[in-house]
Image: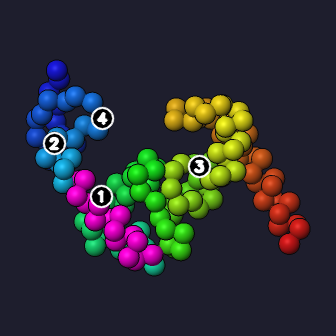
Amino acid sequence: MDTINCKICGKLFYYQTGAPICTKCTSILDEKFERVKEYLYENPGATMQQVSDVNDVSVQQIRKWVREERLEFTADSIIGVDCEICGTLIKTGRFCKNCKDNLAMKLGKAFNKPIPEEVKNELREQQSAKKFLDNRLK
Ligand SMILES: [Zn+2]
Ligand SMILES: [Zn+2]
């Protein structure tokens, strides 16, 4: 087993799998996670900064939970994260529904892996062409 420094408190611990965070910090994070989750349901109007300040969790950490689909912004929430391909605001995960569908067609279901840059570019172009057409129809 390897001993590494915890990413959060810096303490040495035996690293097994998953995030490089010691058990103590993991359980603190889990508690914060539950708090953030509840807070989001009770405060759909809160900004990312408010969620971060009130719950003492970094914006980066909140986005990470959302990307992992552990956390989801409610439908009426004003905040979200950007789709990694086209930049559309989404409530959870890494991609919007359109990009997900396109990716599924292109890569099968394997989009947990990093998406090749050329696939991203191609989809991005498709999406902006679609947006252009949508705007013209309005
Ligand atoms: Zn720690
Ligand atoms: Zn997208």
First-in-chain label (3 vs 1): 1
| Residue that carries the numbered disc 1 in the rendered image | 33
User: What's the mark number on residue 23?
Assistant: 2
Image marks 2 and 3: residues in contact by CB distance under 8 Å = no
Q: For the image shown, how many numbered marks are present on the structure?
A: 4
In three-dimensional space, the C-alpha distance between marks 2 and 1, rounded to whole angstroms, equals: 15 Å
Q: Is mark 2 within 8 Å of ligand 1?
A: yes
Left or right of 49, for residue 97: right
Q: Is residue 40 magenta?
A: yes
Q: Quadrant of the N terminus?
A: top left
Classify mark 1: helix, strand or loop.
Answer: helix
Q: What is the CA distance from the residue labelled 3 to the residue labelled 1?
A: 22 Å
- Side (left or right) of 59 relative to 106: left
Residue at point 30%, 35% (across, down):
18
- The residue that mark 3 highlights is 95
Tag 4 near tag 3, CB within 8 Å? no
- First-in-chain label (2 vs 1): 2
Give the residue type that dot 3 points to: Phe
Image location (x, y in percent) of residue 108: 65, 31
Which of pointers 4 and 1 lies earlier in the amino acid sequence?
Answer: 4
Q: Is residue 79 above or below residue 131?
A: below
Which residue is at the front of the view, 120 or 41?
A: 41
Magenta stretch, residue numbers? 29-44
Which amino acid is tagged 4? Gly
Q: Residues within 10 Å of mark 4 (few under 14, many from 20)?
A: few
